[in-house]
Amino acid sequence: MNPSLYPFYLLSTPHGEHDVPFFEWLVSTNVFNILLVAAILSYLIWRFNLFGIFDKRGEEICRDVEAVERQKEEALRHLDEVRARAKNLSAEVEEILSQARASAESLSVQILEDAKADAEKIIESSKRRIEVEQKAAAKDLERRLMEDALSDARAELSSMDAPQRKQSVESFIDTLPSIQAK
């Protein structure tokens, strides 16, 4: 008898009249091996919680896929921004150049104004210095003239006798107010 047909044979014959024992049929059809493997697999799945591991890994994959989709959307938005900026790039360049020209113009005007102000300060300072030096030179000249005049007066007075010296000193004292007024 074909072992694969044994279950049908068991159903068709009355109880106790079977010519192939159940245990032989079980071993010959590998049903026992299949049941044993199924039992071991069931134990391993239960023991190591394989369904939970698969569920957890599936959730991680879903989160990774969502993260990649968000990154893709962000990259697409960034790409759209870059494309929009690229379209407006020439306008931005012109605007920057015009701002730079205006800034350079205002800076050149400011530099010229500052240079003029510095030149005026230098000229004013030079004028004041010249005046101070002229006054100092005039005082030095006056001092030298006074020293020369005094030395000439001493020399002249030393050559005079006493009455002539007295008369000369008195005439000088008389002319002194008119000299001081000048």
Image: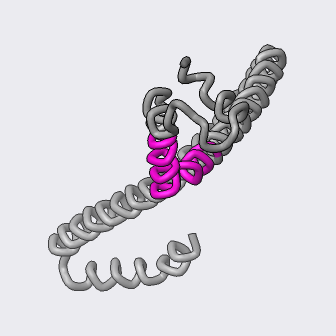
**Quick one: 150 or 127, which is closer to the camera?**
127
Instruction: Out of 103 and 164, give the one closest to the viewer.
Output: 103
Q: Position of residue 78 (x, y in %)?
A: 74, 29
Question: Which region of the structure is painted magenta?
Answer: 35-58
Q: Residue at point 27% right, 79% down?
A: 164
Q: Is residue 181 left or right of residue 173?
A: right
Residue placed farthest to the front in the image?
17
Q: Nearer the viewer, residue 54 or 46?
A: 46
Tell me what residue is drawn at x 45 percent, y 43 percent: 36
Q: Is residue 153 magenta?
A: no
Identify which residue is drawn at 62% across, 23% down.
5
Q: Position of residue 97 (x, y in %)?
A: 74, 21
Image location (x, y in percent) of residue 44: 45, 50
Residue 105 makes an appearance in the image: no
Q: Is residue 56 rendered magenta in the image? A: yes
Location of residue 28 (image quadrant): top left
Taking the image as shown, residue 63 lies to the left or right of residue 44, namely right
